[in-house]
Amino acid sequence: MDFSSKFYAILGLFAFTLLLNVPFGYARARAKKYSFRWFLYIHAPIPFIFIARTLSHVQFTYIPIFVIAAVIGQILGGKLEF
């Protein structure tokens, strides 16, 4: 995989991870803290991110970038008010 295709794959996965976590962050913020639902809303997106990372052949060394994207998405979703 050359640099540009790897860069765009990582950028796309970063955006996917962030956007996927926004609705879960919104739901998490409205759940009782440390309840089963709260725990579920934090961990439910992980299998989808794992599948996307695996299918795009992105290495393990980039996982911290996706963790940062997930945390940002959870925080942004928690701050949303409709």
Image (cartoon, rainbow, N blue to C red):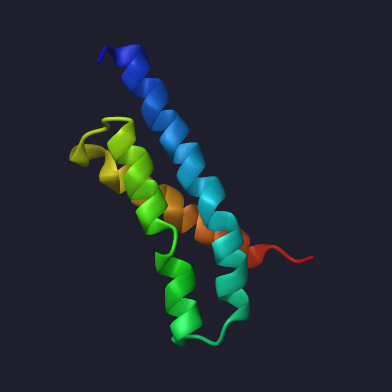
Percent position of residue 11, x then y: 43, 30
Q: Please determine whether, in this image, residue 75 is positioned above or below residue 10.
A: below
Q: Which residue is located at x 37 percent, y 57 percent?
A: 46
Residue nearest the observer in this picture, 75 or 40: 40
Q: Is residue 22 left or right of residue 48?
A: right
Residue nearest the observer in this picture, 50 or 27: 50
Percent position of residue 45, x then y: 44, 58
Q: Please determine whether, in this image, residue 40 is positioned above or below residue 17.
A: below
Q: Which residue is located at x 36 percent, y 55 percent?
A: 47
Q: Which residue is located at x 69 percent, y 62 percent?
A: 80
Q: Please determine whether, in this image, residue 23 is positioned above or below residue 53.
A: below
Q: In this view, does 31 lie to the left or right of 37?
A: right
Q: How many marks?
A: 0
Q: Please determine whether, in this image, residue 44 is positioned above or below residue 21.
A: below
Quadrant of residue 28 in the image? bottom right
Percent position of residue 43, x then y: 40, 66
Residue nearest the observer in this picture, 50 or 79: 50
Percent position of residue 53, x then y: 32, 39
* Quadrant in which the C terminus appears: bottom right
* Quadrant in which the N terminus appears: top left
